[in-house]
């Protein structure tokens, strides 16, 4: 049952467009919009930490509403991968290998929160992801960047009102924060061309989601890529009982405090730490024998057993 306290989209005054010059686009647009959302449909240019973090902006409000999200991410194969498909290799296997090779290390440690939110939604069945591979008219994969340049989002409230946004927002932190980007907003309850525009966006998204668009081949999200995302699943209950979102006119709350999760060193990292310690320990007040001991142990390791 949907909570009647969830605010409605028409209760907020929306600008027809938002630009970098207007201020913090996350605070001005994403947070209030997703505070009203029970469904969020989003296309993003390609699968990367940046793109996922940006798609996750404000979705803690969607989680608090008990809402659901559908996300379409682009995946462009390289020439050698396309040639492998032409030689008979399975497209799904090539896509899975491609996505599994992408490191989801957020560019800023604070961005980990967004990946945690997405991972939590995947684990709870609140987020469904599909992959779109650009193709030609014959359905063969082609080399392009992303699905298309325009990025689209559709937000639906508890009464079925819809807001769509689209524009030149790049899937990078710079696109939201540094670049001079803009996007336009259309409202289904305004009637006229606005409602027609929203309907067109909804139909275009459904066409993509259901695999009916000739320009892309849409596949289910590979398990290997899902496993990469689930590595960010929080070890605490931060998303289990999220706070109720504020009313749209309430002052903006302080951003959540992020508690870094323990980081386990990879084998190569551990070796670098140990040898750095050995190299520098001799300079310590009680480190005069460190170098000699390290050398003795290294020689022991080299002696035949």
Image (cartoon, helix red, strand yellow):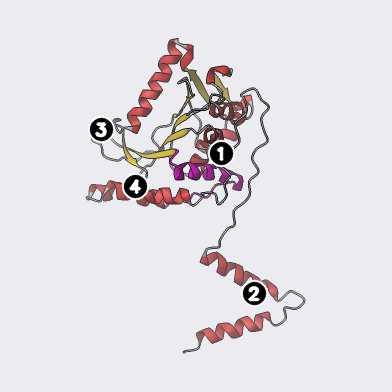
Counting from the top left corner in percent of width and height, residue 271 is at 56, 69
Q: Residue at x 39, y 19 (%)?
A: 199
Find out whether the residues at labels 2 and 4 contact each other: C-beta distance under 8 Å.
no
Q: Residue furthest right?
A: 285
Q: Is residue 178 visible?
A: no
Tag 3's secondary structure? loop
Q: Earlier in the sequence, mark 2 or mark 4?
A: 4
Question: What is the total number of numbered labels drawn onto the structure image?
Answer: 4
Residue labelled with disc 4: 95
Q: Is residue 107 magenta?
A: yes
Q: Residue at x 43, y 19 (%)?
A: 198
Find out whether the residues at labels 2 and 1 contact each other: C-beta distance under 8 Å.
no
| Disc 2 from disc 1: Cα separation | 39 Å
| Disc 3 from disc 1: Cα separation | 33 Å
Q: In this view of the protein, which residue sits in the foreground, 56 or 284? A: 56
Q: Which residues are magenta?
A: 101-126
Image: 150 above or below 16? below
Would residue 205 appear left or right of 264 to someone viewing this image?
A: left
Residue labelled with disc 3: 137
Residue labelled with disc 1: 173
| Disc 4 from disc 1: Cα separation | 25 Å
Tag 4's secondary structure? helix
Q: Is residue 266 visible?
A: yes
Counting from the top left corner in percent of width and height, residue 90 is at 26, 49
Occupied quadrant, residue 136: top left
| Disc 2 from disc 4: Cα separation | 43 Å
Would residue 120 appear left or right of 226 to someone viewing this image?
A: right
Q: Earlier in the sequence, mark 4 or mark 1?
A: 4
Tag 2's secondary structure? helix
């Amino acid at each position: 049952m949907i909570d009647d306290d969830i605010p409605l989209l028409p209760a907020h005054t929306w600008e027809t467009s938002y630009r970098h010059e207007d201020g913090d686009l996350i605070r001005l647009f994403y947070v209030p919009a997703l505070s009203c959302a029970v469904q969020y449909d989003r296309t993003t240019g390609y699968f990367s930490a940046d793109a996922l973090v940006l798609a996750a902006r404000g979705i803690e409000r969607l989680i608090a509403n008990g809402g659901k999200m559908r996300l379409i991410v682009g995946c462009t194969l390289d020439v050698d991968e396309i040639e492998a498909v032409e030689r008979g290799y399975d497209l799904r296997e090539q896509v899975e290998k491609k996505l599994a090779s992408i490191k989801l290390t957020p560019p800023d440690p604070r961005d980990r929160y967004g990946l945690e939110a997405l991972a939590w939604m995947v684990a709870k069945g609140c987020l469904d992801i599909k992959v779109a591979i650009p193709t030609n008219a014959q359905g063969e994969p082609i080399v392009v960047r992303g699905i298309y340049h325009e990025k689209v989002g559709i937000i639906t409230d508890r009464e079925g009102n819809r807001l769509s946004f689209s524009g030149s927002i790049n899937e990078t932190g710079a696109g939201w924060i540094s670049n001079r980007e803009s996007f336009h907003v259309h409202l289904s309850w305004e009637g006229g061309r606005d409602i027609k525009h929203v309907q067109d966006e909804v139909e275009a998204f459904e066409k993509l989601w259901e695999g009916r668009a000739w320009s892309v081949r849409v596949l289910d999200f590979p398990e290997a890529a899902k496993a990469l995302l689930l590595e960010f699943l929080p070890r605490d209950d931060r998303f289990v009982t999220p706070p109720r979102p504020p009313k749209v006119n309430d002052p903006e709350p302080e951003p959540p405090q992020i508690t870094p999760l323990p980081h386990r060193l990879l084998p190569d990292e551990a070796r670098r730490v140990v040898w750095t310690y050995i190299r520098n320990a001799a300079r310590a007040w009680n480190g005069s024998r460190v170098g000699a001991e390290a050398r003795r142990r290294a020689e022991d390791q080299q002696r035949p057993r």
